[in-house]
Image (tube, rainbow, N blue to C red):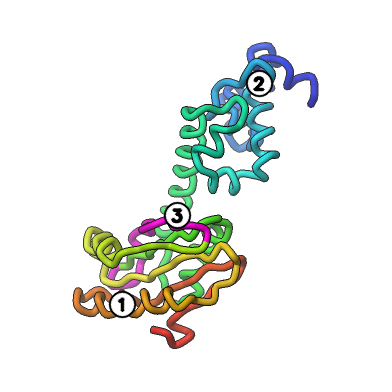
Amino acid sequence: MSEIYRLTVKKMPMEDRPREKLQLLGPSVLSSAELLAIVLRTGNREETAVALAQRMLNDFGGLRELQASSVGELSSVKGIGLAKAAQIIASLELANRLVVTRSANRTIIQTPEDAAKLLMTEMRWLQKEHFRMLLLNTKHHVLAIPTISIGSLNASIVHPREVFREAIRSSAAAIILAHNHPSGDPTPSAEDTQLTRRLVEIGKLMDITVLDHIIIGDGRYLSMKDKGIL
């Protein structure tokens, strides 16, 4: 560890203080550790906020892994309590929602590949099964991409009521179901197929078309529509 990280932030040269750097030069010049240090606000008796942030990034393996971590996992880190853990998760979730919103606002889904590209970057790294849904209008513009449920390492539990409540709330004309397989293999299970067919039938009754079910693996995906499962 360099000598600067043994100093308190107030004793750092002005140009090395994250908040002052952000004010003077803008956020783009700051490292991930410096940005995270601003979220943390303070370090501990042994480390500045910057050093603590860098240690967390190193130990967890990066921002993606931090985002996938629970409050309990983060708060177990020396110098990170429940409050700081919640601040980290909230800030990363806001950043993720901004990315999704920007992508969704300019996205029209025309093919299964379009849907997969929209979801792949985030969902391929998730360590638990997340069941999500693309809500589409009559022209297949993406209205929103809500997370319906989060399951265990290898199972996502979702009820049709939760799926169609979100669709009705957003006045969606059609939906595309999506979930990830943490194993990296997007091959659908028997439960995946059974759930999909059930949701398709319920969608017909409610006049909300289930266009597809995309399963996200590690850098690859499977479209149940393309496979003839729907």
**Residue 180 visible in this rendered orientation of the protein:** yes
Residue 224, placed above or below residue 37: below
Residue 207 image-quadrant placement? bottom left
The tag earlier along the polypeptide, 1 or 3, is: 3
**Secondary element at image label 3:** helix
Q: Spatial distance from mark 2 to mark 3, Cα to Cα?
A: 33 Å
Residue 205 or residue 137, whichever sits in front: 205
Residue 205 image-quadrant placement? bottom left
Horizontal and vertical percent position of residue 3 = 79, 19
The tag earlier along the polypeptide, 2 or 3, is: 2
Closer to us: mark 2 or mark 3?
Answer: 2
Q: Spatial distance from mark 1 to mark 2, Cα to Cα?
A: 54 Å
Residue 131 or residue 21, whichever sits in front: 131
Region of the chain picked out in magenta, as a range: 137-153
Q: Which residue is mark 2?
A: 48
Q: Which residue is mark 3?
A: 100
Residue at position x 59%, y 65% from top? 183
Closer to us: mark 1 or mark 2?
Answer: 1
Residue at position x 38%, y 78% from top? 194
